[in-house]
Amino acid sequence: MKLDELILQYEPQIRLGCFLGIFAIMALWEILAPRRQLSVTKSIRWGNNIGIVVLNSVILRLLFPAAAVGMTAFAQKHGWGLFNYFQTPALLSTLVSIVILDMVIYLQHVMVHAVPVFWRMHRVHHADLDFDVTTGARFHPLEIILSMLIKFATIVVLGPPLVAVIVFEVLLNATAMFNHSNVKLPLRLDKILRLFVVTPDMHRVHHSTEDDETNSNFGFNLPWWDRLFGTYRDQPRAGHENMTIGIRSFRELKDCAWLPGMLSIPFRGKIHDYVINRRQWDDDEN
Ligand SMILES: [Zn+2]
Ligand SMILES: [Zn+2]
């Protein structure tokens, strides 16, 4: 099929082009209508957050050169997965695949908060002291690798069409940049939008230093999973302007904003009680 060949051939260009285009739009929007004042200068934050994105892209290219679309083509060739086994109308298999991939990302996000060793990696995303378009792509390389392996497993079981995988990748990237951006949306518009997509106000709650707030709104793309699985929270208690963003135990610039500190976060501190096995609340622990 011609479209599939085009997708396989131009996958890096399609993704990079969409990333740069949406990044530019959101960056400009943040300048024109910011939601909160940043606590760390943009040059430090952007230099280091984009630094980790470049590092992750290089690592992914080296480890998995064919990426998710390559795994999709491989599954197709071998007849692996639900939609490669059962004949299904293309539109239906595409839509169902996108929705299921999104649900898996939601469940993965809940898992990295619940399992202490995975939370250590995911802390890099949450240790950002501010919340803007670059936060959306700021993940530790180990978490990026874990995400790719989970995506591969999902593809092998699901057997999605190639177009579904590339649309999902672009969509997830776009919505992650949108819902992490420091933009001000009219409250009424936000209310309507968050019925269909995770909005910045909805995801900002998830970046609160408050445990119960950070353990809500796990969705990255579709907002329905949080409502369906009972993890939805409307607004932060302190309000969007006054809430504290980040993790209580990581407040230093060298840990939270500079690349070497960010990369070392998973290996810092003792493996101990985070949420799932916590029995007591302790103010100076995360
Ligand atoms: Zn999270
Ligand atoms: Zn986030």
Image (tube, rainbow, N blue to C red):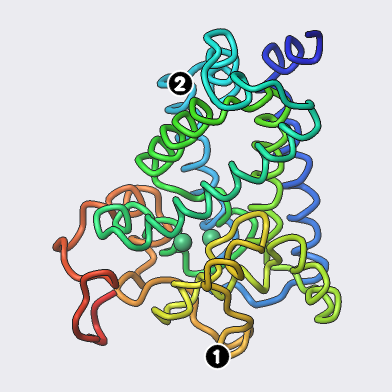
Relative side of 248 to 202, left or right: left
Label 2 residue near ligand 2, CB within 8 Å: no
Question: Which residue is tagged 1?
Answer: 237
Q: In which quarter of the image is the N terminus?
A: top right
**Residue ID at (19%, 81%):** 279
Q: Where is residue 138 in the image (x, y as percent from the top left)?
A: 50, 50
**Relative to 262, does residue 152 appear above or below in the rendering?**
above
Q: Where is residue 222 in the image (x, y as percent from the top left)?
A: 67, 57
**Relative to 88, does residue 2 appear above or below in the rendering?**
above
Distance in Å between CA atoms under marks 2 and 1: 42 Å
Relative side of 103 to 32, left or right: left
**Relative to 148, does residue 250 appear above or below in the rendering?**
below
- Dot 2 amino acid type: Phe
Element carrying mark 1: loop
Near mark 1 (Cα within 10 A), the count class, few <14, some 14-19 or many ≥20, is few
Question: Which residue is tagged 2?
Answer: 64
Q: In which quarter of the image is the C terminus?
A: bottom left
Q: Where is residue 99 in the image (x, y as percent from the top left)?
A: 66, 46
Relative side of 217 to 94, left or right: left
Near mark 2 (Cα within 10 A), the count class, few <14, some 14-19 or many ≥20, is some
Q: Which mark is residue 102?
A: none
- Dot 1 amino acid type: Arg
Q: In which quarter of the image is residue 204?
A: bottom right
